[in-house]
Amino acid sequence: MSTLTIIIIVIVLMILLVVFLYNKLTRLRILVREGWSGIGTFLQQRNDLIPNLVETVKGYALHESSTLTEVVKWRNKSMQAGTPAEQIEATNGMNRALVDFFALAEQYPDLKASQNFINLQNDLTEMETKLNQSRRYYNGTVRNYNQSVATFPGNIVAGIFGFREEVFFEEERTATAVPKVSFR
């Protein structure tokens, strides 16, 4: 083989490697976007449940407007979120507001016994389960994508073609803290 043939083979192999890595990164990025879309679907369904929950509780707890306002505020922020980071912030705020919301509901036995409230609470619980599954899927796809973007030789191709690491859907730091319970 001549030197020219060897150079051509090496160039062709390098081009094939770049094409392979580019396609791999593109497939992984599509999976990340698909995972985010799944989260968005469940967040939308949860956001659609919130007004029904708030209206149901309003009938029993009219004077508890600050808790209800907080839930509505985070629902609206979730609806307006344009980036994953904004959505994560809104979701964490909603989670905190819902904890307060359900703590409020515990103070009203008639509300807790309301079939409408029970159904809405069950729907929200089911939605949270689906949302958690979607978060796990999304974070798995982000992990695989970010590994490909960060490791050699994918990092070279990623840098050339503008592939950037994606953000994980992380729980708030306070989510791992054990809540204090007081029966006073």
Image (cartoon, rainbow, N blue to C red):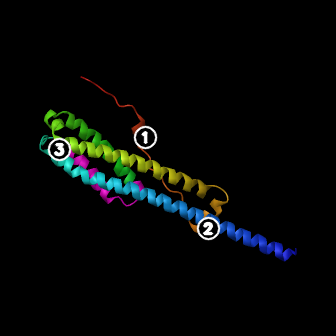
Q: Tell me the residue that label 3 is attached to.
A: 116
Quadrant of the rendered image containing residue 82: bottom left
Element type where label 1 sits in the image: helix
Q: Which mark is residue 22?
A: none
Q: Is residue 72 left or right of residue 3?
A: left
Residue type, numbered disc 3? Asn
Q: Distance between the residues labelled 1 and 2?
A: 35 Å
Measured from the top left, where is residue 64 in percent x and y?
16, 41
Instruction: Judge by depth and name the residue closer to the eye, 127 or 82.
Output: 127
Q: Which mark is residue 160?
A: 2
Q: Which residue is drawn at 39% across and 51% down?
A: 88
25 lies above or below 173:
below
Q: In this view, does 174 lie to the left or right of 155?
A: left
Quadrant where the C terminus is found in the figure: top left
Quadrant of the rendered image containing residue 101: top left
Q: How far apart are marks 2 and 3 (CA)?
A: 55 Å
Q: Which of marks 1 and 2 is nearer the N terminus?
A: 2
Element type where label 2 sits in the image: helix
Q: Earlier in the sequence, mark 2 or mark 3?
A: 3
